[in-house]
Image: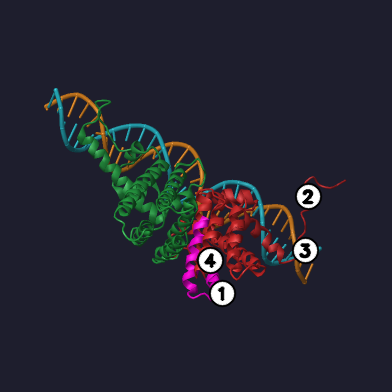
Chain colours: A red, B green, C orange, D cyan
Amino acid sequence: MSERATTTKPSPARTSSAKVSAKREALLSTAEELFARQGYRAVGIDTLLAEAGVAKMTLYKQFGSKEELITAVLERLAGEITSSLTARLATATGGSHGRILAVFDWLADWVRSPAFHGCLFIKAASEYPESGERPRQAAEAFKAGCRELLEEQCRELGIADPERLARQLHLLLEGALVLSFLERDPQAATHARDAAAVLLAAA
Amino acid sequence: MSERATTTKPSPARTSSAKVSAKREALLSTAEELFARQGYRAVGIDTLLAEAGVAKMTLYKQFGSKEELITAVLERLAGEITSSLTARLATATGGSHGRILAVFDWLADWVRSPAFHGCLFIKAASEYPESGERPRQAAEAFKAGCRELLEEQCRELGIADPERLARQLHLLLEGALVLSFLERDPQAATHARDAAAVLLAAA
DNA sequence: TTGTGGCCAGACAGGTCGGTCTACTTTGCT
DNA sequence: AGCAAAGTAGACCGACCTGTCTGGCCACAA
């Protein structure tokens, strides 16, 4: 009866330390979506805050600057992608090339998901092209990680020149990312997989 | 496409028309360089005008808006690339695959030139992601042209499935563009060429 | 010489940007 | 209960944004 009109009784955070992340998480996921759809410089801080339902001071307390927020988005995303991909690789079966082809299957799922609006790392490097800028550094680190992951898979296969094959596969992967976004071709990743199979067979 | 200010009306004299082109050209080439190095939204119109030594009114009389200027830069660049590439192809020798490998040789020259700071078309699509935006349309048109050019070369070779091979080669090309810029790997195009040779041999 | 029209510099307009600050309310731990 | 941390709204800042407009300069034709 005396319940106030405004008492939606927001779920009390049961875990103490999880509470810290609540607003931070809202910021990160909203930022990821808006930046992906519109670009980094095109999205103003105020738009982002309104969408996330967070106050400006919270953003600056948590991240310090817009560029740091972008960097945090990229680092979080890199972690998610890495764990999602390695989980997929762990279950990969098929011939000896199954592991590598599974990377391209995973890629096909990624670029076909409705949340995909181009690779955020490539966009970050485009909009923050100077070596010293943190978003570009995060992008470089992630892409280097991709190449290393591919190289490791090639090495496990006992390929003659694993570094070389890994770089070629990486080209296909990045090409698929770009063309999935630029032309709206959901099959780009499939074509990349086909090409990867050819390269693998020849190695 | 080019300025042809004659017959229809007794319009400006030749001298003033030549002057117009001069300022227009200064705008286009300065814009191309600044946008390539810093990104489209990162470069303000005043910076651009100061660098080009052109008055603001001239820009708006010639192009109407910043987005139209960007579009004009992209269209001019697309023309230059197309003619430079087809000129190279005309002189391509080597085996039956020479023409296609020449595309990747040309690419290697492009990405290694000091003026290369990433593909302006990919960046345009990133910063103007909506279908209705003119810079993105120009980028889509150019990339579609690239794919068609590759497909035509494959077709001339009598490849079984030219469209499919062309798409695979296109993936390598775009991948090389991205990785040349993101990692600063001048060898990306060379690796793409190697991979292209493998795909060609298998087709 | 005088007139004309293209181009100039730069002031201006109206908004938005990233970022700071204050003063207040909620929240969660002890 | 009490307190400190975290979060809130929103005013405010100076810089910068795209785009418009004014008034004058200068080349050239009659």
- Mainly helix, strand or loop, the magenta region? helix
Expressed as whole percent of the image width and height from the top left, the position of residue A37 reads: 56, 49
Query: In whole angstroms, how far apart are the C-alphas of marks 2 and 1?
Result: 57 Å
Chain bearing mark 1: A
Q: Name the residue under label 2.
A: A8
Q: What element carries label 2?
A: loop
2 and 1 marks on the same chain: yes
Label annotation for residue A157: 1
Which tag, 4 or 1, sits closer to the chain's start?
4
Which tag, 2 or 4, sits closer to the chain's start?
2
> Which numbered disc, 4 or 1, marks the residue closer to the eye?
1
Magenta-drawn segment: A148-177
3 and 4 marks on the same chain: yes
Which tag, 3 or 4, sits closer to the chain's start?
3
Q: What element carries label 3?
A: loop
> Which numbered disc, 2 or 4, marks the residue closer to the eye?
4
